[in-house]
Amino acid sequence: MLDNFKTHITKHFPYLLTSKVAIASSGGIDSMVLTYLCHQLQINIEVLHCNFQLRGAASNEDEIFLQQQTEMLKIPFYSVLFDTDDYAKKHKVSTQIAARELRYQWFKAQKEILSFEYLLTAHHADDNLETFLINFSRGTGIDGLTGIPEINDFIVRPLLPFSRDDIFQYALQQNIKWREDSSNAETKYLRNKFRHDLIPKLKEINPGILKSFENTKNHLKGASEILNNHI
C-alpha cells in the first residue's frame, strides 16, 4: 500500500511533500495508517486530536494513546477537550453535528496558530460509498451523488482511492496499533446501518462494488461539470 500511496500523492498531491501538514486523528485505524504512511514518506506532519468526552474514560484513553504514539514517532501532537453534550444543548443540534462543528472550528483556528497549509483526513473508499448511499436514501441532487471531495478548501483526503480492507491489511502487516471506537459498532446511527448491514450485502452481490462506484462517481462528476459550465 505504501508504494500505491506514494504514487497517488506524487501524481495528485505533490505539494504535500513540501508543505507543513496536519492530520486529524481519532486514534482509529484509518487515521493511524494515514499518519504512518505520511511519516514513511517523510512529509512534515503534526497530529491534531479532538477529545469530545462522549465515551467516558475511553475518550481520555484515546488521547493518551495518541500522545504516546506521536511521541514515539517524534511527531508534534496537539489536542483539545470539548464539552460536546453542553454545546449540543446550547445550540439545539444533535451530538454528531455538535462534534462536527466543534472540530472544524478548532481546525480552522489551529491552522492560523500553527501555520500548517493543509489538513488531512482519513476518509477512504468505503466512507465514500456510505456517503453516497446516505445522500441517495435521503434524496439529493447530482452533487450529493458525487461522494466526498478529495479537496475542500484546505482539507485534503488522500486515502479516498483505498478501501477499508486495504487499510486493515496494511495495519496488520506493519504492526500499527490503533484504538477501537465502540460507537462504530452501534447500528442506531444511520451510517453504521449502511456500514454493517447494507454494504456487506452489496459486496457479496458484487465484490467489485467499490470500483463500480468509483466509475459511477466519475461519470456523475463529469456530468456535474458539464452542467455547471452550461449554466
Image (cartoon, rainbow, N blue to C red):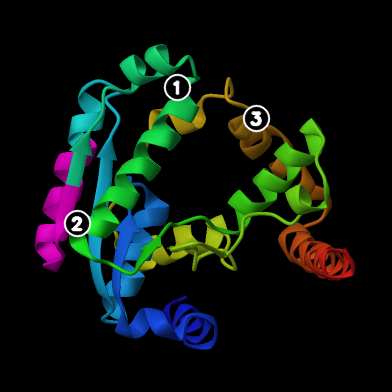
Q: Main secondary structure of the magenta part?
A: helix
Disc marking residue 47: none
Give amino acid for label 2.
Ile
Q: Earlier in the sequence, mark 2 or mark 3?
A: 2
Disc 2 to disc 3, how far (Cα)? Answer: 38 Å
- Number of other residues with Cα within 10 Å of mark 3, as a class: few under 14, some 14 to 19, many 20 or more: some
Q: Report the front residue among 97 and 186.
A: 97
On residue 193, the disc is 3
Give, as a single range, the part of the protein colored magenta: 62-78
Q: Which residue is mark 2?
A: 113
**Where 69 falls versus 97 (above or below)?**
below
User: Going 61% across and 34% down the picture, which residue do you hit?
Assistant: 191
* Residue 3: quarter of image: bottom left
Relative to 11, 144 lies left or right: right
Name the amino acid type tagged 1. Thr
- Please tell me whether mark 3 sits on a helix, a strand or a loop: helix
Query: Badge 1 is on which residue?
Result: 95
